[in-house]
Amino acid sequence: MSGQARLAVCSVVATLAAACALLPLVDRPVWIVQAALLLSIQTAVGAVARRVPLRRGVTVALQALAALLLLTLVFAQQQAMGGLLPGPDVFREFGQLLQEGADDVGRYAIPAPATQSLRLLLVGGVLAVGLAVDALAVTFRSAAPAGLPLLALYSIGAGLGRGGGHWLWFLAAAAGYLLLLLAEGRDRLTRWGRVFGGGPPGGAGAGRPPAAVRTGRRIGAVALGIALVVPAALPSIDEGLLQAHGAGDGPGDDGGTISAVNPLVSLQNSLNQPENREVLRYRTSSENTQDLYLRIVALDSFDGSSWRASERRVTDVPDPLPTPAGLSPAVRTDPVNTSVAAAGSYGQTYLPMPYPAERVLVGGQWRYEPEGRALVGDHGQSTRGLRYQVSSLLVEPTAAQLAAAPAPPEQLLRAYTRVPASLPGVVAETARKVTAGTTSAYQQAVKLQDWFSASGGFRYDTQVQTGGGSNAIVKFLEDRQGFCVHFAFSMAAMARTLGIPARVAVGFTPGTPQPDGSVSVGSKDAHAWPELYFEGAGWTRFEPTPTRGTQPDYSVDRAPTTADPGAPAPLPSRAGAPSAVPSADADCPPQERRLGECRGQVLQADADGTGGGPLRLTTAVVVAAALAALILPLVPPLWRRRARARRLGRGGAVEGTLAAWQEMTDSAWDYGIPPDEAQTPRNAAARIVRIAELDGPAAEAAGRLATAVEQALYAPDPRPAGDPAADAERVRAGLHATAPRSTRLRAALAPRSAARLRWGLAARLGAVGSAWRRVRQRLRRA
């Protein structure tokens, strides 16, 4: 196999190895087989073009055209002319798929379903990176910069993915890159002919690779080992209190599949955005809209640090929906009809509905999850621009009914009071202290709600950082500041420690009434709240978050309460302390008081599932990768410019002449004429003049500089001969004038002589290795 063919194969292997980091992002890895096939065809087109041979720019253009044709054949064949040739319809289809793919990235939890749009993003991204790697490593013969697109591809998967297998993907990507570098090094060595290792033929060293190759392999192995061992020894970052992972795919009764969204993945980022976009608008028959929360999903699985929705089976949407679990005819219920229109910019896979819904009239592909009574979009179905109608019940139990509620069914009690052993004991201890003196589960729930919302000294703050892992709730209880997620998660966890079935609901507060009789629900209304189960009333809403939403009448303790012995003194910013902001007095309209606007608070939210962005850790990783992808390509040209200035500014007859000569030979290397150390200065200058077709001042300057070098090296008393620095600049100007445009661009952006930087780093690594071996030998002798 020729050197170019070996490099091309290694570029494919390195690209696919880096792409393995993307495998955890989707639920079916079949797309990588498709990407491997298309990438192989694209690389083969480049190999044929180089064998013709064609100019480098033409080779890359042909590969890009082949990639476009392949993507058209796979993803937009129906819109193509003749099923293959792309036209305006194909580009419109690609634009639509890319837009849907961007929406799916923000909509789905990991692993996401392998939709057509996500497959286009994955396969197209692999082809783009493969084209860049092949062009750099094979077409332009510079494998080192090819690591930048490989790093970008790996960083996307490592930044968005999660789990314990990241080191495997890193090992695969790093091994692929090292393989590419070794193939390039071997190709360079073969151009010099046979390389001898220095041992006698047939001796002990026969058949062994050269010492330089063995050293390179050792350095690569040591670097990989350090990269894997050091992160493992550093402190890890657990999933924090803000995490809430959606359920994975669950097969329905008729074989359909549902992949859940992650409803809280960007809630904190959304709460800190200034814009309040309308996401829903509805009309309702209920005169009491303050309790008309629009529920999206229920999170019922608690692992000690995060809440998520359990994986459950889904069915076709029944008509009507089953009777809510635990609801008794003795509890008062009022029927409510609600007509909802979703904004075109609001894409959510779960259907926001009042709870509990009895009948839903909605178009599209929707499935029903019975335990959470939620409707979930199937095969990419979302709420974008959707209109639907919901018939629901407004459940209004009395405090006496909740206080006298019998014990829940044993199966439900076990499922919804389960807490992990990793939950710190202080959580249950605090719950018992807060609810001391109560005689029923209802009184305990009211005590908890009042402690969080009023008497416990908690403060609403969307900028809070509460840490992660099993101690996240403990830190929130100590700092006593957070936003709705912290309050809902913590109250539900504490209720479970008391034996009260609890889960967390995510959705919207009722919204703002409009003059035309409709109600507008904006991104500011995104919210999370706990639901506690009471036999006879079913799952019952509570509101522990201060200044957000409304507390139901049945949850307000009308009796005077004693002060909490474990609560700190109220913070200065709470009621009763001097404040520069207006208080929520009787002059404040009820709706503004419910939204917390009377206190001058700006509580922003964005619940469209496509905005916001990844969590802070993910954002930091992606931003770091993007910065590396932007900065690292600038290192070679900046180093080259600095080296040129240093050489041409060096004084002294001998030092200045030799530095100018090195600058001239490196400039020729940048423009495609590699240095030949076996040539004399005069022959080397003549070779540069001949290959670059220099004439006039440039050719004369090269001859003068060669004569000056001979003087500096061999004359007993070297004398300055002209201006070596000026002659080196004249030669570089001549090289630039005679070189084609692509060569000039390569010399400016990716100079070949920057390989000296890599050689210098390798030499330093070798020196460090040698020093370490000497130290180890001394320690062994000692």
Image (spheres, helix red, strand yellow):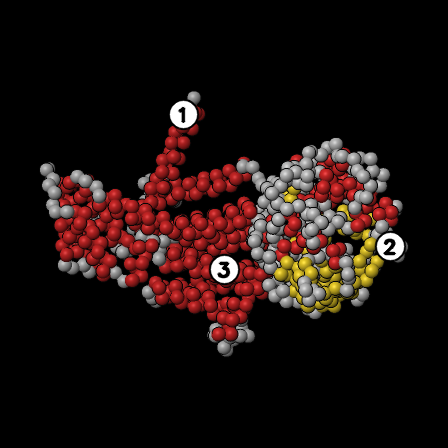
The relative height of residue 534 versus residue 424 in the rendered view (above or below) is below
The image shows residue 735 at horizontal and vertical percentages of: 23, 57
Instruction: Provide the residue designation for mark 3.
Output: 125
Q: Which mark is residue 778?
A: 1
In this view, the residue in front, 603 or 677, is: 603
Mark 2: secondary structure: loop
Q: Which mark is residue 248?
A: none
Looking at the image, the residue that sits furthest to the bottom is 82
Instruction: Provide the residue designation for mark 2.
Output: 331
In this view, the residue in front, 781 or 14, is: 14
Say whether disc 2 or disc 3 marks the residue closer to the N-terminus: 3
For the C terminus, give its image quadrant. Answer: top left
The amino acid type of the residue labelled 1 equals Arg
Residue 721 in view (yes/no): yes
Picture quadrant where residue 779 is located: top left
The amino acid type of the residue labelled 2 equals Val
Say whether disc 2 or disc 1 marks the residue closer to the N-terminus: 2
The image shows residue 764 at horizontal and vertical percentages of: 36, 38
- How far apart marks 3 and 1 lie (CA) works out to 51 Å
Q: Is residue 289 left or right of residue 634?
A: right
Residues tagged 2 and 3 counted as in contact (Cβ below 8 A): no
- How far apart marks 2 and 3 lie (CA) works out to 57 Å
The image shows residue 86 at horizontal and vertical percentages of: 48, 73
Q: Nearer the viewer, mark 3 or mark 1?
A: 3
Q: Residues within 10 Å of mark 1 (few under 14, many from 20)?
A: few
